[in-house]
Image (cartoon, rainbow, N blue to C red):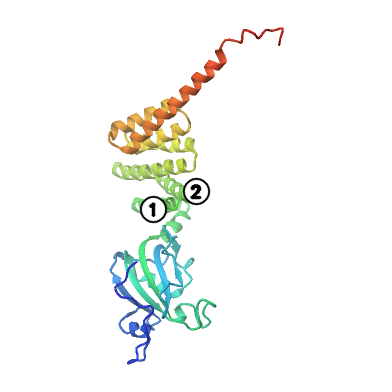
C-alpha cells in the first residue's frame, strides 16, 4: 500500500500545539457519528458497500502516533486471511470502517480509544487511551450470510425459492471454495464445492433454458472438484468428477486434461493418453496439455524399460554350473 502523504513520525506543530493526528482529524470524514471513527479515502473503490455479515479480504497496517513502523500489519502475508465481520475482527472501529468501503478502496482511519483498545490499551504495546491510525485496503469481500441461511434449510424449503436464488448461493459457495483453494486449504475448499454441487443437483429445472443454466454451473463446480482431489492426491475421485464434467460437455478440454492427469497418477497410461490426446485436439497449443503428454511419454518409457528388465530377469537362462544336485 502507498499513501499520498506520510503521517507517522511528524512532530507536534509548535504554532498550533496540535499533534499530527489532531490536525489530520480536522479534514477527515466522521463515519461513527461521534467522531470516534474518522476516514480519509485515498483511492476510491467500486461496486457495493461491504455487507454486515461479509467475510473480507484486506491488507492493513496499524500505527501509533509519532511512530514510523506499524505495531500491527498483515501486509507481509502473500495471501491475507479471509476474516468474517463480527467474528474475526476485534476492533469495533475497523469493523465500522470496513462497512463504509467498496472493493478496491484504499483508506486511512483514525480510531479513538473507545473504538480501538479502550481506556486500558493493550500493554506493553498499546498505551492507555490511545488513538490509533489504520491504513486499510479492501481487496475483496464475500457475503456468506445468505448462503449459510439457505444451506441450513431443508430440500423442500429450498425448492420454494426461484432458480436465481439457488444459482446465486451456489456461486457464492464456489467463490469461497476458490479462495480457500488459492490458500492451499484444499480440504476446506472441497467442502465448499460439494455444498455448491449438492444445491445444484437438488434442483430440477422444468424449462430447458433453466436446465442449461444449472448444467453450466455444475460443470464449473465439477472441474473445481476434480482439480481439488488431484491436489489432495486422490486421483480416483478426481477422475470420477472429471468424467461427470464430460457428461455435461464431452469436448471440454479442461475436463479431459484433469482426467488425463488423474489416470497418469494412477499409472493407467493408455487411458491417460486417450484423455490427453482428446484434450490436445480441442486445444492444440495449450502448453499444460502438451507438457503433460511429454511427461506421460517419459513415464511410459521408464515403465516399459522396467518391464523389459523384469522379463529379462525372469526368462534369462540358468547358470550352466547350477544343477539340481547342488540345490
Residue at 64% of width from left, 8% of height from top? 321
Viewer-nearest of labels 2 and 1? 2
User: Disc 1 on helix, strand or loop?
Assistant: helix
x and y percentages locating residue 313 in the rendered image:
56, 17
Indicate whether 250 appears above or below 169: above
- x, y percentage for residue 82? 44, 60
Front one among 151 and 116:
116
> Mark 1, residues whose alpha carbon is within 10 Å: few (<14), some, or many (≥20)?
some
Report whether 250 appears left or right of 113.
left
Q: Earlier in the sequence, mark 2 or mark 1?
A: 1
Mark 2 Cα shell of 10 Å, populated few (<14), some (14-19), many (≥20): some
- Which residue occupies 50% across, 39% down? 234
Specify whether 78 is left or right of 279. right
- Secondary structure beneath dot 2 equals helix
Q: Foreground: 150 or 222? A: 222
Which residue position is annotated with label 2?
187
What x and y, as percent, mark residue 115? Answer: 45, 78
Gap in angstroms between the C-alphas marked 2 and 1: 15 Å
Question: Which residue lies under the disc numbered 1?
Answer: 175
Q: Position of residue 18 (x, y in %)?
A: 36, 89
**In the displayed structure image, the side of residue 150 where residue 209 appears, left or right:** left
Choose between 321 and 92: the one closer to the eye.
Answer: 321
- Above/below status of 223 relative to 141: above
User: Contact (CB < 8 A) between labels 2 and 1?
Assistant: no
- Which residue extends farthest front? 321
Q: Quadrant of the C terminus?
A: top right
Taking the image as shown, residue 137 lies to the left or right of residue 118, namely left
Q: How many marks?
A: 2
Q: Quadrant of the N terminus?
A: bottom left
Which of 186 and 80 lies nearest the eye of the viewer?
80
Residue at (33% x, 36% y) in the render = 253
Amino acid at each position: 500500500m502507498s499513501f499520498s502523504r506520510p503521517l507517522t513520525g511528524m512532530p507536534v506543530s509548535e504554532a498550533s500545539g496540535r499533534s499530527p493526528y489532531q490536525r489530520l482529524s480536522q479534514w477527515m470524514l466522521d463515519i461513527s457519528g461521534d467522531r470516534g471513527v474518522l476516514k480519509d479515502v485515498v483511492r476510491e473503490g467500486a461496486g457495493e458497500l461491504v455487507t454486515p455479515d461479509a467475510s473480507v479480504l484486506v491488507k492493513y497496517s496499524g500505527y501509533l502516533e509519532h511512530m514510523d513502523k506499524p505495531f500491527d500489519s498483515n501486509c507481509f502475508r502473500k495471501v491475507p486471511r479471509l476474516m468474517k465481520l463480527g467474528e474475526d475482527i476485534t476492533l469495533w472501529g475497523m469493523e465500522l470502517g470496513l462497512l463504509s468501503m467498496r472493493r478496491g478502496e484504499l483508506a486511512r482511519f483514525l480510531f479513538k480509544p473507545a473504538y480501538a483498545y479502550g481506556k486500558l490499551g493493550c500493554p506493553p504495546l498499546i498505551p492507555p487511551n490511545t488513538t490509533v491510525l489504520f491504513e486499510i485496503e479492501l481487496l475483496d469481500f464475500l457475503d456468506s450470510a445468505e448462503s449459510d441461511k439457505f444451506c441450513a434449510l431443508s430440500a423442500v424449503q429450498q425448492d420454494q425459492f426461484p432458480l436465481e436464488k439457488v444459482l446465486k448461493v451456489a456461486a457464492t459457495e464456489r467463490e469461497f471454495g476458490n479462495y480457500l483453494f488459492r490458500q492451499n486449504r484444499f480440504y476446506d475448499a472441497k467442502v465448499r464445492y460439494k455444498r455448491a454441487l449438492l444445491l445444484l443437483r437438488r434442483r430440477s429445472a422444468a424449462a430447458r433454458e433453466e436446465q442449461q443454466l444449472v448444467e453450466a454451473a455444475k460443470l464449473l463446480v465439477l472441474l473445481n472438484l476434480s482439480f481439488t482431489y488431484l491436489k489432495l492426491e486422490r486421483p480416483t475421485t478426481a477422475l470420477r468428477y472429471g468424467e461427470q464434467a464430460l457428461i455435461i460437455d464431452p469436448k471440454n478440454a479442461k475436463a479431459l486434461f484433469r482426467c488425463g492427469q488423474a489416470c497418469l497418477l494412477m499409472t493407467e497410461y493408455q487411458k491417460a493418453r486417450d484423455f490427453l490426446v482428446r484434450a490436445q485436439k480441442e486445444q492444440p497449443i495449450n502448453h499444460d496439455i502438451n507438457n503433460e503428454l511429454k511427461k506421460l511419454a517419459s513415464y511410459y518409457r521408464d515403465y516399459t524399460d522396467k518391464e523389459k528388465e523384469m522379463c529379462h530377469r525372469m526368462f534369462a537362462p540358468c547358470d550352466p554350473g547350477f544343477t539340481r544336485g547342488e540345490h
